[in-house]
Image (cartoon, rainbow, N blue to C red):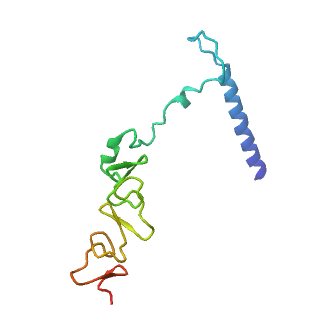
Amino acid sequence: MKALLVFALFMALVTTNLSAADESLLVDNNDDRSRVGPPSRSRFLARKHRGAMTCNEYPRVCGVVGSPGPDCCKRRCVNVEKDRLNCGKCGRKCKHTEICCNGNCVNPMSDKWHCGGCNNGCDKGSKCLFGMCSYA
């Protein structure tokens, strides 16, 4: 099994070196200036990756149905009203015990207006303990 792995790695190395050597032999007939430096990349490698579109380049991506959120933070679509890593604005992180509710970091174990979860307020006169209203 080890011999097969070594052989596969050797073949990959040889293939890479041969393709680099073949590329350096190519001559550009449209350019009569002499070239100095490493050979240019192939057209395939020079093309931009057309995979996933990021919101930095295409801001409308975040507005598409099924997007995680309408806001763009660090090339990712997020909802700053609910995202713990971008609560209220990009880069604002909630503490480990907190969640993001309406753009504010709150502790659901003790917050009267967000007891046990966002917008789960306790009745007047009751307290939020351990994420439950009127515990005990």
* Depicted 77 relative to depicted 11: above or below: below
Marks counted in the figure total 0
Task: Return the residue nearer the eye: 99 or 52.
Answer: 99
Image position, residue 132 (x, y; %):
32, 81
Q: Residue furthest left?
A: 124
Question: Which quadrant of the rendered structure holds the C terminus?
Answer: bottom left
The answer to whether 111 appears left or right of 93 in the picture is left
Residue at 66%, 24% (x, y): give it.
38
* Depicted 51 relative to depicted 76: above or below: above
Task: Return the residue nearer the eye: 58 or 49.
Answer: 58
Image position, residue 30 (x, y; %):
55, 11
Q: Residue furthest bottom?
A: 136
Image position, residue 92 (x, y; %):
40, 57
Residue at 70%, 25% (x, y): give it.
21
The answer to whether 49 appears left or right of 23 in the picture is left
Image position, residue 79 (x, y; %):
34, 55
Residue at 45%, 40% (x, y): give it.
51
Quarter of the figure with residue 59: top left
Task: Return the residue nearer the eye: 1 or 110.
Answer: 110
Task: Return the residue nearer the eye: 82 or 53.
Answer: 82
